Image (cartoon, rainbow, N blue to C red):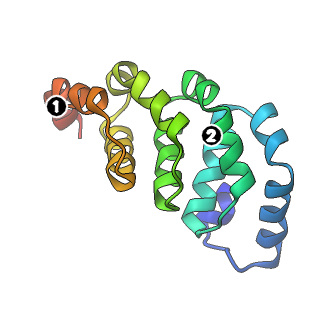
Amino acid sequence: MHTIAKMNLRNHRTSSILFSQVETHAEWLVKEGNSQDVANTVWACATLGVQSPKLFSQVEKHADWLVKEGTPQAIANTVWAFATLGVQSPKLFSQVEKHADWLVKEGNPQNIANTVWAFATLGVESPKLFSQVEKHAQRLIMEG
């Protein structure tokens, strides 16, 4: 999926079959995959503009696991994908807000920028996330 998106092969016959299979097996993919695999898959969907309601619904359903187990990059890519496709996900964004301290401390400037962009794009309020960004602003600027 990731390679198909990187190569912008949205209209290729293989990609349509693959995206169809992702949608068919969305529950299995999220339950059995790891957080990075899930993040890469939703990122690929968003990059190519492919709606996958079952996949995104499963990510929402398992948001607590995804945020607890994911890296800052995986989390950032996941919320970026939701925002890019305009998909609201109250549970996912709530979990990110809940873990904002860790996310901002551990994430790099690009991860944090993508996460903040996703919240802003979907109009999701996040006082804890924005407070942590402000608290770590000097580090984020120096590293960015």
Does 141 sit left or right of 22 as displayed? left
Which amino acid, by three-letter code, is at mark 2? Glu
34 vs 142, nearest the viewer: 34
Instruction: Say which quadrant the C terminus sits in.
Output: top left
Q: Secondary structure at mark 1?
A: helix
Which amino acid, by three-letter code, is at mark 1? Ala
Q: Residue at x 74, y 52 (%)?
A: 54
Most extreme residue toward the left, as rendered? 138
Q: Residue at x 67, y 35 (%)?
A: 61
Question: Residue 55: percent from the left, percent from the top?
Answer: 72, 50
Where 48 falls versus 32 (above or below)?
below
Residue beneath disc 2: 60
Does 137 sit left or right of 54 as displayed? left
Where 7 falls versus 116 (above or below)?
below
Residue beneath disc 1: 137
Q: Secondary structure at mark 2?
A: helix
- Tell me the distance, in whole angstroms, between the alpha carbons under discs 2 and 1: 29 Å
Question: Residue 4: percent from the left, percent from the top?
Answer: 68, 65
